[in-house]
Each structure stands twice: as C-alpha cells, then as structure tokens.
Image (spheres, grey):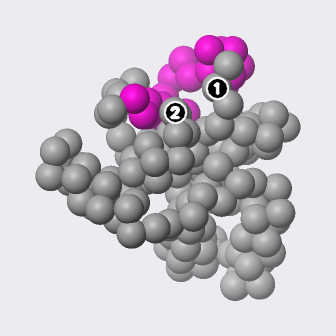
Amino acid sequence: MVERILVDTNVLVYAHDRSAPRKQMRAIEVLDRIADQSLGVLTPQVLAEFFAVVTRKIPAPLSVADAYESLENLLLSWECLEYSADIVLEAARGVRDHRLSFWDALIWASARLHRVPLVLSEDFNSGAAVEGIRFVNPFLPGFDIESLLRT
C-alpha cells in the first residue's frame, strides 16, 4: 500500500472548477479518498498555485475569502512538506538530468527528498517514473483510486 501521495495543483483546482464537471467529480472523489486514508501530501508551491488559479484563472473563480478558507482546511488535514535549498538544487538537477520544467521538477524533488513515492498530476506522463517517483494522471480513463491504494 502507498503510504503517502503528493497531490499536484491541478487536482486541487479541478475540485473547485465547475466548468469541467467530469474532472471536478473525479478530483473530489480522489481527494476525498486520499483524505479518508490520511495519505495526502502537499507542498507550499502547490498551495500557492492553487490560491492563484482558483481566485483568478478558472471560469467561476472563488472569492479570496473562500480560497483562503480552502487553504486553511487543507493545512488542517493534509501534510505540507517543507522546502529547503536542497529541494531547489535537486529540482535544478531534475531540469538538467531529466529535462523537467523547473516547476514540475520542484514537485518531483519534493517527493523524492521527502520519500513520497507517488505524485497525482495531469502534468507528467502518466505511469512514468523518475528515480523512484511514479506519476499518475487521475483524469485518464480507467484510473481507479482503490487499486492505486492497494498497490
């Protein structure tokens, strides 16, 4: 069984984006199940991107007050990994060695240095693994959170 799962910004955003109802339903289902199992992990980057996107970039943005409340709730119930200079350096190595974008490399480096083996995101090649960190897109057909939690 997976012990921790890092959730990328897009999964959090879709849970609040009514313009994409299928993705919204999937995101809510996945986030609820991860929260039920206390497996969810976030980073400061994910939280910052979430706030910026849901208050400005989705078709029906949240109010700043509602987005703030969502951040508070996430921080009460999800683990938030700390950033360090080592993570920034590791991310730069991810750009150099694996040709990741810098922002994706920060997600990868955070997972790698904090030993979180799985990242849920639609921004990486689903099923790919980079130095032991596996990426899965929860919005692809056939995705099953239950089978993921059993492996």
Mark 1: secondary structure: loop
Tell me how far mark 1 sits from mark 2, CA to CA.
8 Å
Mark 1, Cα crowd under 10 Å, few <14 / some 14-19 / many 20+, is few
**In this orientation, which residue lies closer to the viewer: 32 or 139?**
32
**Residue 67: % across, % down:** 71, 75
**In this orientation, which residue lies closer to the viewer: 88 or 48?**
88
Magenta residue span:
132-151
**Residue 133: % across, % down:** 42, 34
Mark 2, Cα crowd under 10 Å, few <14 / some 14-19 / many 20+, is some
Relative horizontal placement of residue 55, taking residue 132 as reference (left or right): right
Relative horizontal placement of residue 30, taking residue 124 as reference (left or right): right
Q: Residue 125 occupies which quadrant of the picture?
A: top left
Q: Residue at x 77, y 84 (%)?
A: 65
Question: In what quadrant of the picture does the N terminus appear?
Answer: top right
Relative horizontal placement of residue 151, taking residue 8 as reference (left or right): right
The residue at which mark 2 appears reads as: 117
The amino acid type, in three-letter code, at marker 1 is Val
The residue at which mark 1 appears reads as: 2
**Residue 80: % across, % down:** 65, 59
